[in-house]
Image (cartoon, rainbow, N blue to C red):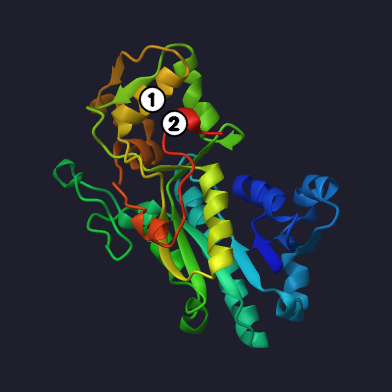
């Protein structure tokens, strides 16, 4: 298949490119081609193009069977007003351009677009037992729910018919992202439980993210799917498994009154959480490979 990847220079994009290049013809799109140089050196058979070139020659999209959208500024950062704008713009503007170009040339490829389980907002402690499914709406909204929902609504109704939205949990891999940072305090025996540790922590291994994307391509899935490990961890169980995998003790606790001073990003990703079900994607035949922190590869 001819597959176009938007946001291929990011963490997921680099690894997805390496996985798909053997069986597919890949076209990688970036604002600056130098961001893709290492990928092209490692995989000279791929093609690269800038957004400007794509907008000037939209007919290039006519040869594309699948478009995978991975665009988005990392949520890891200080959530100033300017950074929040980047979080929105980096996700919505690429889809707006894609939408305009595809409608212009009247082409409807299979589109796979990623967002996050933050789409469900957050849960109160008394709601932790409820596992969000794809039809649920955010009861307690947040910045992350606003970003995800606006992103998922960007494409026109015509293109939505061929679109699969993947709501990812926190993507973990020793190769990069947030997981190596999470492990550092545990290496020194300083891992800690935040609050009482009962807040849900929905994560997924990079291996399974790539596996789900391949599965969706193969089966031409459309609609919305949660992509999280079936482990249903909370803050306490996750940190306990992580400490055990490193043969370190877990004895520290971070009170919520102190944790809240770490800022909005920490509150939204660590203090607040979502208990999320991935049963829908499993019902399509996908079998998760990583269900325990110690097995993350």
Horizontal side, residue 172 vs residue 104: left or right: left
Q: Residue at x 38, y 36 (%)?
A: 266
Are the two marked residues, 2 and 1, in contact with CB atoms closer than 8 angstroms? Answer: yes
Cα separation, mark 2 vs mark 1, equals 6 Å
| Label 1: few (<14), some (14–19) or many (≥20) C-alpha neighbours in 10 Å | some
SS of the residue under disc 2 = helix
- The vertical placement of 262 against 272, above or below, is above
- Name the residue beneath numbered marker 1: 241
- The vertical placement of 213 against 266, above or below, is below
| Image position, residue 16 (x, y; %) | 65, 51
Pick out the residue farthest to the left.
126
| Label 2: few (<14), some (14–19) or many (≥20) C-alpha neighbours in 10 Å | many
Horizontal side, residue 22 vs residue 140: left or right: right
> Which of the 4 quarters of the picture holds residue 264?
top left
Residue 93 appears in the picture as rendered: no
> Which of the 4 quarters of the picture holds residue 54?
bottom right
Task: Please tell me the numbered disc located at residue 192.
Answer: none
Residue 230 appears in the picture as rendered: yes
| Image position, residue 213 (x, y; %) | 55, 57
- Name the residue beneath numbered marker 2: 293
- The vertical placement of 195 against 69, above or below, is above
- The vertical placement of 9 against 155, above or below, is above
Q: Residue at x 61, y 73 (%)?
A: 98
> Which of the 4 quarters of the picture holds residue 247?
top left
Horizontal side, residue 39 vs residue 187: left or right: right
């Amino acid at each position: 298949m001819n597959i176009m990847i938007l946001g291929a220079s990011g963490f997921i994009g680099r690894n997805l490119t390496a996985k798909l290049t053997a069986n597919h013809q890949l076209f990688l799109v970036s604002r600056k081609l130098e961001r893709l140089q290492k990928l092209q050196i490692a995989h000279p058979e791929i093609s690269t193009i800038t957004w400007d070139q794509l907008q000037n020659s939209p007919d290039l999209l006519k040869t594309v069977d699948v478009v995978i959208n991975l665009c988005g500024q990392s949520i890891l950062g200080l959530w100033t007003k300017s950074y929040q704008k980047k979080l929105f713009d980096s996700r919505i503007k690429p889809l707006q351009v894609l939408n305009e170009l595809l409608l212009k040339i009247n082409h409807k490829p299979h589109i796979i677009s990623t967002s996050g389980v933050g789409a469900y907002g957050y849960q109160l402690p008394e709601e932790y037992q409820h596992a969000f499914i794809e039809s649920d709406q955010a009861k307690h909204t947040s910045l992350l729910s606003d970003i995800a929902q606006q992103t998922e609504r960007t494409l026109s109704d015509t293109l939505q018919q061929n679109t699969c939205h993947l709501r990812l949990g926190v993507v973990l891999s020793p190769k990069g992202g947030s997981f190596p940072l999470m492990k550092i305090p545990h290496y020194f025996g300083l891992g800690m439980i935040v609050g009482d540790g009962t807040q849900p922590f929905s994560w997924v291994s990079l291996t399974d993210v790539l596996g789900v994307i391949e599965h969706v391509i193969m089966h031409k899935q459309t609609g919305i799917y949660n992509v999280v490990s079936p482990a249903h961890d909370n803050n306490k169980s996750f940190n306990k498994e992580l400490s055990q995998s490193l043969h370190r003790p877990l004895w520290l606790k971070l009170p919520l009154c102190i944790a809240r001073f770490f800022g909005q990003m920490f509150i939204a990703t660590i203090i607040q959480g979502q208990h999320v079900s991935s049963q829908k994607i499993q019902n399509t035949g996908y079998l998760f490979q990583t269900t325990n922190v110690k097995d993350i590869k």
